Image (cartoon, helix red, strand yellow):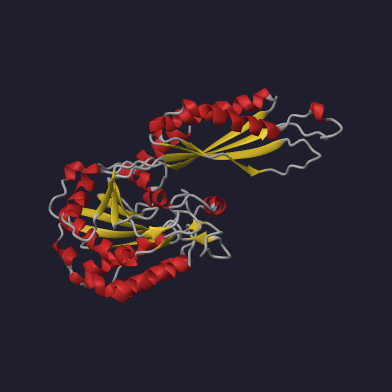
Amino acid sequence: MLLKQNYAEIKRIADSIYANPELGYKEWQTKETVIDFLKQKDPSIEICEFSTTGFKFQLGNGKPLNLGFIAELDAVYAPTHMYADKGTGAAHNCGHYTQVAIALALYTYLLESELYKTFDYSITFIFVPAEEYLDLAYRDELIAQNKITHYGGKPEAMKLGVFDDIDFAICVHAMGGEFPERTIEVNCDLAGFLYKKYKFLGKATHAGFDPFSSKNAYNMSTLFNVALGLSRQQLKDDEHVRINPIVMESDMSTNVIPNHITVGTDLRTKTIGYMKEVAKKIDDAAKGSSQALQGEVEIKTQMGYLPFVQDRYLSDFVIEAFKENDEITGISKNNAISAAGDIGDLSYILPCIQIGYSGFTGTIHGDDFIDIDPEYIYEVFPRFLVQVLEKMNGKIDPSRLHKKSYPEYVSLINSIVE
């Protein structure tokens, strides 16, 4: 009943965030909107802020276990989206605005019903900035100013100790596409990715007078693209490999043979080991393409996100709750996809799950993405999450929960980039 009573207010907040999208580490208005709501519900709430726009707070202190419930604050850069911000190009076509609203609906219910007091674990709500891996020039500035260390919000929060007292975590995420029934998704594993830059270097000459002594960097990049295309038959299908090379920068002129061009690509794979193997193959293709045309190539590797393998032990509680739920009729299981998220990085140091929910139309990250079943998203689905939390109450086995440190995470990342 409380979720039904609060539905209109939660939807209003969701609509406001949707209409005012902000890119990562810039979610100032979103942060203010959420904190204003929280303080209205509980004027004495203690909020801990981190990494520009991130913040967290806890329900139920001093319990043996602490669950982190995570919501992501940022939008995607999608200037052609129907409701994109005209100034920044930001748009909420990944559904993060609904995550925030769902977290607020769940928090409000637990607070007003005082149900959290009956749990044998605490719940820390964590609102994290910058999940989307974009707007990198701005993040480079923040790194240069020593304001952040990581491009992704969760790794940055890990560095700052935000998750040090968290034992296991739940995130929720919009499901792309339309479904014939209200649906949840469990055990959807995600790929990890590297970000690669190849700067091909040649020799510039007059394109008409003396092309004979040139070394055409653009042709090297073209040969590189051909090599990538022909190499795809050597890549394992079950690793869900994705490569998307793009020209990042060039100042070519039609009367000058280009002597430099930079090609960037992400490299997505299911496992870390295969990521390193494919990265070497791509590097070799770039080196060979430059050498074939007497040029050179400079290679830079930047870590994206780690692969995400959902914790099956925690997912079992979600499945049990679904079996007893009479409002949600569809469930999707065990669908590994090549999308990625920094939940993969967090899952390296502690067990995590990400529960998907339907209720949208259009293509996720596309120009037409929007919710079409807000009642499900902001009322029914949070009610289901309450069931999940009740299933976990008194049944979480600490021996089934792994924990690693941030230095261990950094060591792993360095080994991949090297």
Residue sitting at 63 percent across and 39 percent down?
262
In the foreground, 126 or 1: 1
Residue 137 drawn at (x, y percent): 57, 51
Whether residue 1 is situated above or below residue 169 in the rendered picture? below
Q: Quadrant of residue 5?
A: bottom left
Whether residue 288 is situated above or below residue 256 in the rendered picture? above
- Residue lying at the far right of the rendered structure: 209
Residue sitting at 45 percent across and 54 percent down?
363
State whether residue 39 appears in this view: no
Residue 110 drawn at (x, y percent): 22, 66
Q: Quadrant of residue 102?
A: bottom left
Q: Quadrant of residue 213?
A: top right
Q: Relative to residue 131, is residue 60 drawn left or right?
A: left
In the foreground, 248 or 119: 248
Residue sitting at 23 percent across and 60 percent down?
384
Q: Quadrant of the N terminus?
A: bottom left
In the foreground, 389 or 53: 389
Residue 240 drawn at (x, y percent): 41, 36
State whether residue 20 appears in this view: yes
In the foreground, 173 or 180: 180
Q: Relative to residue 84, is residue 400 drawn left or right?
A: left
Q: How many labels were placed on the picture?
A: 0
Residue 339 drawn at (x, y percent): 42, 45
Whether residue 129 is situated above or below residue 186 in the rendered picture? below
Q: Relative to residue 117, is residue 172 drawn left or right?
A: right
